[in-house]
Image (cartoon, helix red, strand yellow):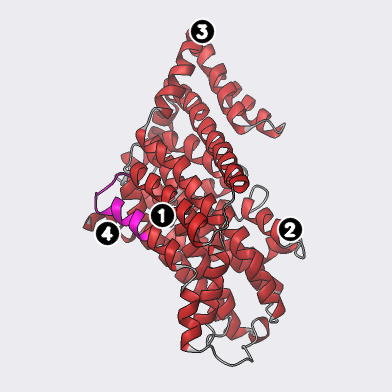
Amino acid sequence: MIEPVLVVVLLIGLIGMGAPIFLALGASGLLGLWMARGPLAFFFAPTSIFGQLNSFELIALPLFILMGNLLSATPVGTNLFRAAAIWLYWLRGGLAIATVGASALFGAVSGVSVAGVAAVGSIAVPQMLERGYSRGLAAGAVVSSGALAMLIPPSVPFIIYGAVSGVSVGALFVGGIVPGLALAGALSLYIYIRVRRHPDQAPRENGPPPRPAEMLRALGGIWHALLLVVIVLGAIYKGIATPSEAAAFGAAGAFLIAALVFRTLSLRSFAQILASSVKVSCTILLIIGCAKIFGDYLNLVRVPEIVTERLTATSLPDWAILVVLMLALVLLGMLVDAVSLIVVTTPILLPLILALGYDPLWFGIILVMNLEIAVVTPPVGLNLYALRGVCPMLSVEEIVRAVLPFVAVQFVMLMIFVLFPGLSLWLPGLL
């Protein structure tokens, strides 16, 4: 069994040398297929890529990315934060809690965590620092809550997991609602307790309270985008449209909001948004396709079966096996990007999850909750660098220290949903 070792060594070596992840996955998988099947590997590989990408549900991926990019080009992110800050004016730490709320809502608009960090963080951090909030509280609130976009639908990771596992994307969207809201609530509760214990980290507002008319006006800059999201997700949940059809409607609606409501869309900026959306979509699809080559090799040499047999043969209870898997996924997430982690680990771990008697829908939700931790932990935590890009007054080291308590909250919530699967499955069960 020297061949699988060589394949893994090549994969790790290429990643370590800085090779694109799609190249590392494709080359190592092709090497494995060649050692196992000889020249036939060069026929298997294209078939693997085509079979993986020939999925109607994957059409939703570039369309939701385009929808998010179009809305990111509008003041929606800024307006969300301002509206939340005005409505939570009375609460100590209200700006930090408003950041969590704005990031959760922007996640429902964009589906991409980095976009949420950039859009909300660029206005939230300067506002909090100006009002005397601690730098750690400001940075940690933005980075951690930005990850909510991965769990709150429409979620790009759910689309990818659905394509790899065959689980309904619509069911995954529904399943992500309760964990997403619960995590947003947990982060807000942590902020509230923290500022109650350390009032100097979040001074109370000194100005006059906002008038009711001002509070209503604050909603005027966000209702268009939120209505679009409600219509798009409502069409999916009610079975009126597939995720791909709803994504097309969402992209068209986002174009109209950007072009006609906010008037922030010029021909030049629209071309840039299209180019960016195509680039991101192609990158993700390349990773998914090449990961299928790697996954087919693992299936060929029975790696998923061996892992399942070995772990189920141990005397460990099911919950202990799950905790070990979650810790391993958190560690892997610190080193590998979210897309790669989904497409590589799902074919290996899903047979084990099924053998333990768990629902693949539940596993998809738990996997994405793991990814939320991955995007806020170094060295591959993209949210850390996204905040550094829009808030140069903060160093990366400072942001990392600030986010650690929030990561602990995320991990506790992850364990709760791991040990109590019904929490994330009851809402999909109703539909």
The structure residue drawn at horizontal position 34% and vertical position 43%, both measured from the top left corner, is 245
Q: Position of residue 181 (x, y in %)?
A: 41, 65
Quickly name the residue at label 3: 38
Q: Which marked residue is nearer to the observer: mark 1 or mark 4?
A: 1
Q: Earlier in the sequence, mark 4 or mark 2?
A: 2
Q: Position of residue 204 (x, y in %)?
A: 62, 88
Q: Can the viewer see residue 317 in this picture?
A: no
Quickly name the residue at label 1: 153
Amino acid carrying mark 3 in the image:
Gly
The residue range painted magenta reads 230-242
Q: Position of residue 36 (x, y in %)?
A: 49, 13
Q: Nearer the viewer, residue 308 or 211?
A: 211
Amino acid carrying mark 1 in the image:
Pro
| Position of 347 relative to 357 (above/below) | above
Q: CA distance from mark 1 to mark 2?
A: 29 Å
Amino acid carrying mark 2 in the image:
Val
State yes or no: residue 237 in magenta.
Answer: yes
Q: Secondary structure at mark 2?
A: helix
Quickly name the residue at label 4: 426
Q: Earlier in the sequence, mark 1 or mark 4?
A: 1
Q: Earlier in the sequence, mark 3 or mark 1?
A: 3
Q: CA distance from mark 4 to mark 2?
A: 39 Å
